[in-house]
Image (cartoon, helix red, strand yellow):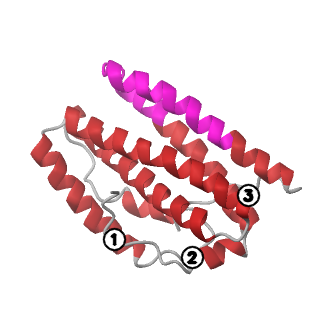
Amino acid sequence: MLGLKLPTDPRWVNIVEKNIEDILTDHAYCEQKAASTAISLIVSFPEYTELVEEMIELVNEEMSHFKMVHDLILERGWILGRDRKDDYVIALLKFFPKGGSRTTQLVHRLLYAALIEARSCERFRLLSEELEDKKLAKFYRKLMISEASHYTMFLNFARQYGERENVDKKWQQLLDYEAEIMKGLSNKETIHG
């Protein structure tokens, strides 16, 4: 369903299980960054009314997810740690060249967002199926469903605002590029790393 070309190495869950505090902190910041991306799309492309409406909803949802993760951190007697750079996103954002028309920039940003949500969804599925902590597994199952709808929303907007054949071609190229990135990841206690 997600179209990802390289699945996450299942051994990644073993790293996560040994570092639950770190993964929850990283996850909390991922939710903040998702909300920030939605706000940035509103600020950068206010003339796309349908997109703006959906991004308003997304900001609210992502911040509610942040609160849920933060609450889990506090329940376990921890505090929110510091944000760390996301090697996955840094590498991913190098794919499309800078510049181009506003429409091209919008399509590229939507495709990046779709892919990040797709990978998050795939990772959450793995956590929901493999974590020994059943409460956490159930939590990730709920979030997985949400991430899947975000992925399709971003991809559909890219196809709506760009020329469909060109968008689909770029999407496939981005998926290939992301698979190469993933070969060097799945070795850290981060959502994408």
Residue 39 falls inside the magenta stretch? yes
Question: Separation of disc 2 and disc 3 at Cα?
Answer: 19 Å
Q: Position of residue 53 (x, y in %)?
A: 42, 21
Q: Say whether residue 152 is visible.
A: yes
Q: Can you tell which of label 1 and label 3 is closer to the viewer? A: 3
Q: Amino acid at mark 2?
A: Trp
- Which residue is labeled 1 in the image? 179
Amino acid type at mark 3: Lys
Residue at image point 64% right, 77% down: 15
Q: Provide the secondary structure element on which disc 2 rests.
A: helix
- The kind of secondary structure element at disc 1 is helix
Whole-percent x and y of residue 160? 21, 33
Quadrant where the image shows the N terminus: bottom left
Disc 2 vs disc 3: which is toward the camera? 3
State which tag comes first along the sequence, 2 or 1: 2
| Residue type pointed to by label 1 | Ala
Number of callouts in the render?
3
Above or below for 100 versus 29: above
Q: Is residue 50 above or below residue 6?
A: above
Q: Looking at this view, is 147 or 59 the one in front? A: 147
C-beta proximity under 8 Å, tags 2 and 1:
no
Q: Is residue 66 left or right of residue 43?
A: right
Residue at 57 percent across and 60 percent down: it is 85
Q: Position of residue 89 (x, y in %)?
A: 45, 58
